[in-house]
Amino acid sequence: MFEYVESKKIQTGIPRIDWIAEKLEVSHRYLNDMLKVEAGKTAIDNANLFLIAIAKTMLLENKSSISEIAYDLGFEYSQYFSLIFKTRTGISPSAFINKNKLN
């Protein structure tokens, strides 16, 4: 995943499970099954968690808008990014920014 982010491929979309599996030299089905067994989450869930961790850092740096961050992370729509962010963290990106400004 770090290679994906650093290569700027992320701007062409969220990494596909096929791409991750290819890099690991396993089938996408095997990757998904192993992640489900070991981590309790699917490959796409793990990819989303990774992207949310990066997003948190970007949001705290506060150099870009939420829409720009969503686009930079490969999300086609900022609303989908906000939905994923809120689902994973329990708060919206703007609430995350506001909460961390106060601390």
Image (cartoon, rainbow, N blue to C red):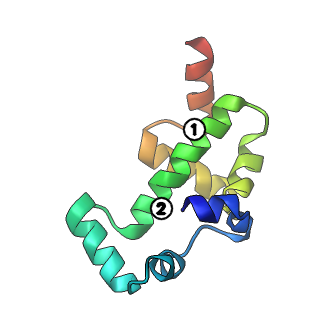
For this rendering, which residue is in front, 23 or 36? 23
Residue 72 x/y as whole percent: 73, 55
Badge 2 amino acid: Ala
Image check: 101 left or right of 41?
Answer: right
What is the crowding at mark 2: few (fewer than 14 residues within 10 Å), some, or many (at least 20)?
some
Q: Are marks 1 and 2 in contact (CB under 8 Å)?
A: no
> Is 55 situated above or below 39?
above
What is the crowding at mark 1: few (fewer than 14 residues within 10 Å), some, or many (at least 20)?
some
- At x 22%, y 63%, the residue is 38
Rendering quarter of residue 78: bottom right
- At x 62%, y 28%, the residue is 97
Seen from this angle, which residue lies furthest left? 37
Q: Which of the numbered marks, if any, corresponds to residue 45?
A: none
Query: For the C terminus, which image quadrant?
Result: top right
- At x 45%, y 79%, the residue is 21
- At x 33%, y 75%, the residue is 32
Query: For the N terminus, which image quadrant?
Result: bottom right
Compute the Cα span from label 1 to label 2. 14 Å
Can residue 40 be seen here? no
Residue 68 x/y as whole percent: 77, 48
Task: Label 2, secondary structure: give it.
Answer: helix
Image check: 43 left or right of 58?
Answer: left
For label 1, the residue is 56
Can residue 67 be seen here? yes
Task: Label 1, secondary structure: give it.
Answer: helix
Residue 12 x/y as whole percent: 72, 71
For label 2, the residue is 47
Residue 48 x/y as whole percent: 49, 58
Badge 1 amino acid: Lys
The first of marks 1 and 2 along the sequence is: 2
> Is 3 situated above or below 28?
above
